[in-house]
Amino acid sequence: MSDHQLFASSSTAASTLVAVIVSFNRLEHLKQGVAAVLDEPVAGLVVVDNGSTDGSRDWLADQQDPRLHVLMPDRNLGGAGGFELGFGEALKVFDPDWLVCFDDDARPAPGALQCFLEQDLEGIDGAAAAVYYPNGDICEMNRPSWNPFWHGRLLWRTACGVMTGRSREGFHLADRHYRENRRVEIDSSSFVGCFMRANAVRQIGLPRGELFIYGDDVIYTLSLRKSGGRHVFLPDVRFVHDCSADLRGGARIRPLWKAFYAYRNGLLMYRIAAGKWFPLVLPVKLFSWLLAVRHYPEKRRYLSLCWLALSDALRNRSYRAHDELARRYP
């Protein structure tokens, strides 16, 4: 992959930053995130509330900071749809130089956004913060990565790791990268503490909202790199993610419809990441799905979901009506 940037501005003026939060029924977390952002020198904050019923909408409506811009869609768009809507609105309303996004259970550590704005951002199109749990441990689900299919040495290391159950270590940043005070070139990162240059967003498009949940962030940042953009990890820009250590709750994904998005979007991601090697990756993923059937009491329903996810991924179909999926796979 090309390591040169395509979208960065050559302007030396101070950069403007707008944050985008997607929220759903986590009011206490949302309060912390909004306060953390508005304590920093941001040009704006866009909050997309995905139909919360816990008082979040009333609380947001009562806030008076003129930098806060709230969107309340009439249906749950999922995280992916929320970021698609939020990115577009942030560009339209604030016209910033940079966007930063995160979930409602995450927040920038004190001074993190100021720290980002003080970085040398020339030649950078995207950046990932160092994300930690509240206890100070590294948040595994937000650990940035390289695409092993673009780096021969990493591909070999990852393949060897499959044999020992440690394949993830082959292509994700190590703990030492968090301790070292230097930026690291990466290929993908999560949407928690993800900074995107506005010009890059305009060039590659908005996040793919039709993906609903899971994998939209990796697909988006891989697309940035595939388009020639430069994405880096900034260890001194810190975020806190107050989430469960296991996002999907163990071997069984519940409710079942979440497995559809995890499986289909995972294959869509591998099509981008693996390229010509995708036919070799596909049977490995399908085998892992079949192994997981033992964890699901309604095995026929689970296998039906697997077939639907496979069919959609192979046809590159990325939209399904969520209400129908939730009804079919409760």
Image (tube, rainbow, N blue to C red):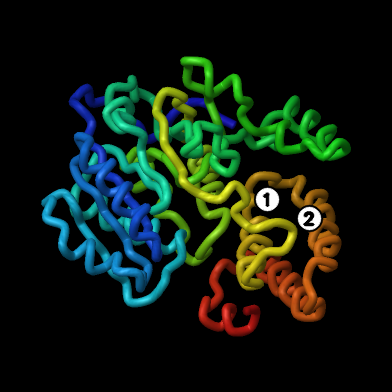
- Classify residue 94 as left or right of residue 241: left
Residue at image x 56%, y 50%? 244
The answer to whether residue 254 is above or below residue 243 is below
Residue 13 on image: x %, y %: 18, 25
- Write down the quadrant of residue 313 in the picture: bottom right
Tell me residue 208's x, y (percent): 47, 59
The amino acid type found where label 1 is placed reads Tyr
76 vs 286, left or right, is: left
Residue that carries the numbered disc 1 in the rendered image: 270
- Residue under label 2: 285
Check disc 2 and report its element: helix, strand or loop: helix
Considering every residue shown, the one lying at the far top of the view is 181
Q: Secondary structure at mark 1?
A: helix
The x, y position of residue 291, in whole percent, is: 85, 61
Q: Is residue 172 above or below residue 18?
A: above
Residue 228 in sight here: no
Cα separation between marks 2 and 1: 10 Å
Is residue 252 shown above or below 327? above
Q: Is residue 195 left or right of residue 217?
A: left
* Percent x, y of residue 67: 16, 49
Picture quarter with the C terminus: bottom right
Q: Nearer the viewer, residue 31 or 269?
A: 31
Badge 2: how crowded within 10 Å, few (<14), some, or many (20+)? some
Q: Pointers 2 and 1 in contact (CB under 8 A)?
A: yes
Q: Earlier in the sequence, mark 2 or mark 1?
A: 1
Q: Residue at x 57, y 36 (%)?
A: 143
Rendered residue at 65%/63% (across/down): 264
Q: Which mark is residue 149?
A: none
Quadrant location, the N terminus? top right
Dividing the picture into quarters, in which one does residue 165 lie?
top right
